[in-house]
Amino acid sequence: MPKRSIGSEDSEDELRESPSGPNGESPCAKRRKCVEFEPVRICSIGSVKEIENRVLLAQHYKLCERFRLKEKIRLELEKRIEGFERRQIQDDAVMCIINRYWNRLDEEIQLLLQRFDRETAQIDAEMKDEAANSTHHDDTHFLSVIAQWTCEEMDEKLKQRVEFSQRSLAKLVQTFSRIDERNGRIIALLRGDGETSVETDINDETNLETEKDKKKASPTFVDENGTTTANEEAKKKGNIGKASLTSIENELRKHTSRTLEENKRLQKMLTEMQSENHRLAIKATSHDDNVHTMALRVDSLTTEIEDLRYRLHKSMQREEKLDFRLAEYVKKQNALQISATAAPSAAGDSQPNGAEEELASLSKSKLEELQQDLETQSELASNRLAELQEMTERNKALSADLENCKMKLKYISSDDVKKSTEYKCLQTAFNSLFEENKLQKKEVDELKQQIVQSKQNFEEQINSVKNDSLIALDRLQQTVIELDNDLNTARREYENVCVDYEVNTASREQAMPINEQMNALMNSLNTQNTQLKQEVARLKRKCNEMSVQVQMCQKELDGERRVNNDNYLIIKLEDEMPSGSSMPSGNSSVSQLEGERAVQKADTDGTSPATLDGVEVKKEEPTDTTSQNGQSNDQQHQNSGAFSPPPTDLTEAQNKLRTLARADLKEKRKCWTDEQRRRVKHLEDQGERLRRELQSAKQEEDGLMQEMESTGQAFEELQEQHQKLVEQLREKDDVNLKLMSERIRSTQAQKKMRDEKELLDQNIQSLENQLATKLLHCQRLEEKERVLSENRVTLEHELRIRDQNNETLRKKGMEFSQLATDLRLRLDRLDIQFTELRESVIKKASSYEANANKIKRLEEEKSSLKRKLDRAKRMEKYENVDELLQEENRILKESLTCPSCKVNRKNAILDKCHHVFCFECIRLRYDNRRRKCPKCNAAFGANDFHRIYLE
């Protein structure tokens, strides 16, 4: 099997996981092409606990996603913070470099100004004050000082510093200009310009002295453009011709005395500067050593920090894994509890799903671990590579320094040896060692005090841990006792609830047959009610039909009334409609008046009284229908009493009308035709028929009303019974609900007690785990104490050894000081010998060079003579000049042909040995890996040969 890289495996996994496959189409493109919605599969849920488990699963998944997103954000922020820190470090380094070189510039300017002590005596006082103000941050670090300043203060301080450097430069330029002027005056005097120059010099000196006095009184700066030169020239013109030639000698003497004094001062300053330079060099070396040690310590600390970060990352990953596994185990435990109560089929369905989720989570976690390991390994590799590059650069620099030092050691000059300060170096080294010894003693005392303090702190920590563990054990015992008491009380309550539940179930079983009988009775009553409702609906339908028929008849009567209203007058007869009828109309008086009018009309027109009877019947029918539609008898009596005339007058009038109508009928019947009689008969028959139908309908309606009243009473009685039964059922349901609620409460209390018991068990386990961890912590602390005690013993031993070493070093220092004096004397002797040898070597070298030049000239002469001799021999050998020229041409061609192949011309040169060959031969050698010169076997590379063009 061939080896495969991690990247290929990752790519294959991605190809397997990706829905697009190897076709190269992205999943987004596929989704755009066709969107398929899967059917929603609602899982079967048996209890509230399963719903909670499902909700917890979804919440856990969402929390994992949010956690990963926050982790990514945190990593990005860490990267940004690292970049900002690097930038800040670079800015701080640049600021420190600028500050260092600026301080050096100020110091060098001050040194240059101190060299001119006589001219710049008043300047030094000003410079000291300004230097104290500008370099007050040397005691503390520049960055800490900048951190304490605000932006406005920083601008002001930097402006002051720039002004200080500008003023110091202006002063330096001023001093140099004065020195130039003085030198110019001296040169003019030496050249002998005469009395004028002497007088001008004297005037210049007097002017300078007056200016110095003025500056001492009020120190001011002179401009670089020389604003004071105009005044000096004016004074020179006024004071020409006042001095003599003897002033030249005085001026020269003064100048020589000044130069001697300045020389002495410069020598003193030089010795002081050399000593200070030596002291600063020693201090710089000590600081460099400290910096080197601190850099090594920083490197070690950085490596330790990286290791700790790596361990922390690993521990976080393990913690995530353990949390995830713990959650899975809790899920499995819940699933097992559910499967114990539920059907075995549900358990069989849940197990493969859990296994698939576990495998998916494990594969994802492994992939994440591998990616994180790869990132850490790549970071470590990059760090190691950077360190190796730094080490190689340091190695190169050190090797170059070493070679330079070797060259310097080989060629040491006598002046350097004379100026060497080995004795001073040894003395300073001894002083530094003595100071270091004192510092080490102080550090030893401090370490001893720290060891004692750490012991005391450690003992206090151990005592506090023991006390905490005892308190935790007491609390645990108290909680266990309280939980036992709560459990006993819960058991008693549960037993009481069980007894109540059994009593309630027994009473419910006794009440069950009574409830069944009541239900049967209720069902029978409901069926009777439905039948009665059907009959009532049927009767209502019949009543509506009859009312429709009555309305139709009323309409016909109204039509007949309209036809015959103008021609007939209806009068009630006693034999047809008795006076004592039970339905008096409210319009009786009106009907009587109409009857009188009809009689009168009948008298005039000659109509028959039979028609009047038919019309009277038709007019009486609406009154009957109106009474049927809803008017009560009392209202009818009231209306009749309100509209009727006095009874005596009415009866008399009725009797009169009836007699008149009968007489009129008798008279008119004699005059009727057959058609009229038939018509009257027909109308009378029709009226009788309608009266009979009306009476039958009234009777049916009365019967139906009586039936309705009886059924309504029965229905009301049944409803009352039904309500009583419903109330009884409600009471029983309330009792049952109370029993069920009590049972639910008991079950809930039981569940709560179980949950509390589980929580208490978990708390006990967690407390036990904490106890175990604390015991382990105590053991680790004891081990640390043992290690610290061992370290203390070793440190004490090392301190003793260091004390002994210090004593030996002190003795050696004394010996070295004596040796230094001896070596000093020997060095002086060797210096003398060295000078003598040097002179002899110089003489021999000059003679050797002269001989070498002579030898070179002789060799050149020899080569030229040899060429002449060869040419003469050829002339002797070849009689013809053309043959000679051809031979020379052949020799020249041979010199131009490649010595390796002797075919091609020379067109390539080797840079290392400068031998010339053809390009094909060198290329062939390079391709065949025979990369050496054919003449001298010097190795060459791809960049060590190139083409040349010989004419």
Image (cartoon, rainbow, N blue to C red):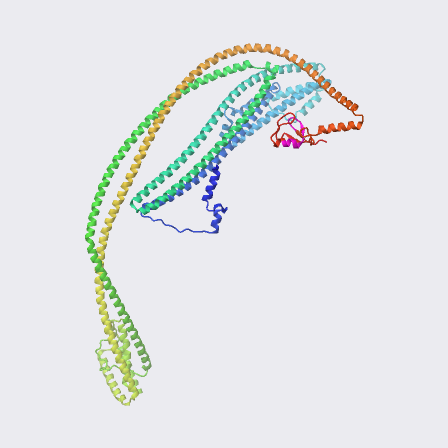
Residue 556's x, y, as percent? Answer: 31, 78
Give the image quarter of residue 751.
Answer: top left
Asked whether, in this view, residue 859 is left or right of residue 769, the answer is right
Query: Is any part of residue 313 visible from this angle?
Result: yes
Asked whether, in this view, residue 640 is left or right of residue 830, the answer is left
Asked whether, in this view, residue 39 is left or right of residue 150, the answer is left
Give the image quarter of residue 206.
Answer: top right
Which of 854 and 674 lies nearest the eye of the viewer? 854
Residue 860's x, y, as percent? Answer: 73, 20
Give the image quarter of residue 74.
Answer: top left
Q: Which residue is drawn at 28% across and 39% down?
A: 757
| 482, above or below 853, in the image | below
- Farthest residue in the bottom direction? 670
- Residue 923 is a magenta residue: yes
Which of 375 and 822 lies nearest the eye of the viewer? 375
Residue 249's x, y, as percent? Answer: 70, 14
Residue 706's x, y, as percent? Answer: 22, 69
Number of labels in the image equals 0
Q: What stretch is highlighted in magenta?
A: 910-924
Which of 406 and 224 lies nearest the eye of the viewer? 406
* Quadrant of the frame with the C terminus: top right
Which of 924 and 281 lies nearest the eye of the viewer? 924
- Residue 543 is a magenta residue: no
Query: Is any part of residue 607 visible from this angle?
Result: no
Asked whether, in this view, residue 621 is left or right of residue 416, the answer is left
| 189, above or below 365, in the image | above
Q: Which residue is drawn at 34% across and 29% down?
A: 776
